[in-house]
């Protein structure tokens, strides 16, 4: 059988891409969610998410990784970067029991190796997948689990399929976790840095101690003030002869309450002296003038 030039070129292109390990959604429809690696897909069609079973008898309680289909059907998916959800683009009423809405891809549980299902959209953590800067789909708004393909493939209806499960984002080979995602206009979507999802580190006891304010009575290089004079904590006696009067923080002398009367009496005596002197001077002036 002779091959046309177009068919030959198309086959060579697919083989070349497969050798490079690039995502080969051979049908190139949009929107699209396909694995970035070919994962040894024998036909060069690429791998896409897929609902098990056939139309009118789809198994919405179990999804798988399947070679991308020419007309899309249940292997064509759309990623919404706003809600961070994945939905089958060609979803039809009656495919699943949740036929009132378009339905969303969801993890059966937030545990490693959990399977993936299709259910009514509720924006739960199980249905939330963040597209990361590494092209992973990270579940649960910052968990360490990502949506991925299983290591092994098995025969199904003349094709090879893989498990569709949650895998450890840190230890799994990236070829099982990376996607090429396009929007409805065919634009390639880029991910975000998920380091912002990491919780802040828990302070150590030393850090807690260093961040605490020092109580006022424990300042001055951390030395506690000496205990008051006298026995049993009794207040110190007022300063007597030969003792310097107490000073405030500015270095000014702080008068004791007991000295206030003496200060007032001294001020009154000085005033009387000034008045007597003034009267005497005025008397001398009047005597001179007369």
Image (cartoon, rainbow, N blue to C red):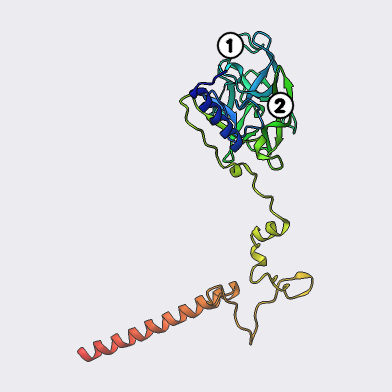
Q: Nearer the viewer, residue 281 or 120?
A: 120
Distance from the alpha carbon under mark 2 to that under mark 1: 24 Å
Label 2: which secondary element: strand
Can residue 290 be seen in this snapshot?
A: no
Residue occupying image coordinates x 79% and y 70% = 232
Label 1: which secondary element: loop
Residue occupying image coordinates x 56% and y 73% = 248
Q: On screen, 92 above or below 199?
A: above
Q: On screen, 231 above or below 242?
A: above
Q: On screen, 228 above or below 171?
A: below
Q: Is residue 22 left or right of residue 201?
A: left
Provide residue 73's location: percent of width, then percent of height: 58, 16
Residue at the extreme bottom: 288
User: Where is the N terminus found, in terms of image quarters?
Assistant: top right
- Indicate the quadrant where residue 230 lies: bottom right
Q: Nearer the viewer, residue 40 or 240?
A: 40
Provide residue 253's location: percent of width, then percent of height: 54, 77
Between marks 2 and 1 in the image, the one whose residue lies nearer the viewer: 2
Q: Nearer the viewer, residue 141 or 275?
A: 141
Say whether disc 2 or disc 1 marks the residue closer to the N-terminus.
Answer: 1
Residue identified by numbered label 1 = 92
User: Where is the C terminus found, in terms of image quarters?
Assistant: bottom left
Mark 2 Cα-neighbour bin, 10 Å: few <14, some 14–19, many ≥20: many
Provide residue 150's location: percent of width, then percent of height: 72, 31
Mark 1 Cα-neighbour bin, 10 Å: few <14, some 14–19, many ≥20: some
- Indicate the quadrant where residue 237 lies: bottom right
- Indicate the quadrant where residue 219 lies: bottom right
Q: Is residue 204 left or right of residue 136?
A: right
Residue at the extreme left: 290
Residue identified by numbered label 2 = 162
């Amino acid at each position: 059988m002779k091959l046309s030039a177009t068919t030959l070129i198309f086959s060579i292109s697919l083989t070349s891409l497969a050798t490079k390990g690039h995502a080969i959604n051979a049908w190139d429809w949009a929107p699209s969610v396909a694995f970035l690696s070919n994962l040894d897909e024998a036909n060069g069609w690429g791998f896409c998410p897929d609902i098990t079973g056939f139309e009118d008898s789809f198994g919405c309680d179990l999804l798988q990784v399947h070679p991308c289909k020419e007309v899309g059907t249940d292997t064509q998916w759309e990623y919404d970067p706003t809600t961070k959800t994945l939905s089958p683009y060609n979803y039809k009423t009656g495919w699943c029991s949740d036929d009132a809405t378009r339905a969303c891809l969801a993890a059966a549980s937030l545990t490693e190796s959990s399977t993936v299902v299709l259910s009514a959209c509720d924006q739960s953590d199980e249905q939330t997948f963040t597209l990361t800067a590494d092209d992973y789909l990270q579940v649960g708004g910052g968990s360490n689990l990502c949506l991925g393909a299983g290591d092994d493939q098995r025969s199904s209806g003349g094709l090879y399929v893989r498990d569709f499960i949650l895998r450890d984002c840190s230890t799994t080979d990236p070829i099982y976790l990376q996607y090429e995602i396009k929007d409805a206009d065919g634009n390639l979507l880029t991910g975000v840095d998920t380091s912002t999802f990491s919780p802040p580190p828990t302070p150590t006891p030393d850090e807690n101690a260093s961040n605490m304010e020092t109580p006022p009575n424990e300042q001055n290089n951390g030395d506690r003030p000496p205990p008051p004079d006298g026995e049993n904590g009794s207040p110190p006696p007022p300063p007597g002869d030969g003792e310097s009067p107490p000073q405030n923080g500015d270095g000014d002398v702080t008068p004791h309450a007991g000295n206030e009367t003496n200060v007032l009496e001294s001020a009154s005596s000085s005033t009387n002296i000034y008045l007597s002197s003034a009267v005497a001077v005025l008397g001398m002036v009047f005597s001179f003038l007369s």
